[in-house]
Amino acid sequence: MKRITLVATIGVFVATLFGALAMAQNAPLGDYARQARKQKDHQAPAAKSFDNDNLPRADKLSVVGQAPAESGDASAPATSGETAAPDGEAKTSSPSSGGAKPPDSAARQTAEAEKKPAEDEVAQKQKMFKDWQAKIQTQQTQIDTLARELDLTNREYRLRAAAFYADAGNRLRNASSWDKEDAQFKEQIADKQKKLDDAKKQLEDLQEQARKASVPSSMRD
């Protein structure tokens, strides 16, 4: 009888203990559940998922993360003749022996090639001017020579005439011979005068031709 009572007492004690433990556990679990519901109410709406039906087509998509590597053509090293400069611009490498010449050298050669014909043309004009000048000077020299000869002949004629007419007896004795000599002097003078006039006319023609050839006046006179 005592054993049954002891067992019953122990059973009641154990039942009471488990009931208290159950109540103690139920209280924190209830609080936790209420707190979880509050947090769920305050949480941000779930992230929107995209599929083929709601995927935007007009707007651009922003990609998060590292940009994809460029294609092999863009990332390939610079071709021969160009090297990558620090600022990203391509620089032309120095031309190799036998290659294309630098632009400055080509431009300089072009300028020299254009300059040479111009210099040759100027040289030819100067030579032409000097040729005309030489012709004019030669003609002027001939005129000066003819003028001196004419002047000498005139002087000689005047002297002979003065001597002849100074002596009356000589005029009587040598009248016929003087007439012949006088005619010769006059013929010589006329011939020299004609040559001088022709030479002067030739000089004028040369000067006019030189003027038409654009010879400077300083070289025509």
Image (cartoon, rainbow, N blue to C red):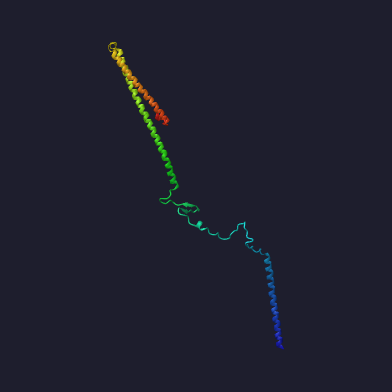
Q: Is residue 175 above or below residue 12?
A: above
Residue at (43% x, 43% y) in the render: 110
- Residue 173 located left or right of residue 208: left
In front: 68, or 208? 208
- Residue 35 located left or right of residue 87: right
In front: 102, or 24? 102
Q: Is residue 63 above or below residue 23?
A: above
Residue 11 in the image: state x and y as whole percent: 70, 83
Residue 62 in the image: state x and y as whole percent: 59, 58
Quarter of the picture holding the C terminus:
top left
Q: Residue furthest bottom?
A: 1
Residue 66 in the image: state x and y as whole percent: 55, 60
- Residue 81 located left or right of residue 37: left
Residue at (68% x, 70% y) in the render: 33
Q: Residue furthest left?
A: 173
Is residue 217 visible in the rendered structure shown here? no
Residue at (71% x, 87% y) in the render: 4
Residue at (36% x, 22% y) in the render: 194
Residue 203 in the image: state x and y as whole percent: 38, 26
Quarter of the picture holding the N terminus:
bottom right
| Residue 140: quadrant of the picture | top left
| Residue 201: quadrant of the picture | top left
- Residue 175 located left or right of residue 35: left
Q: State the count of labels.
A: 0
Is residue 7 visible in the rendered structure shown here? yes
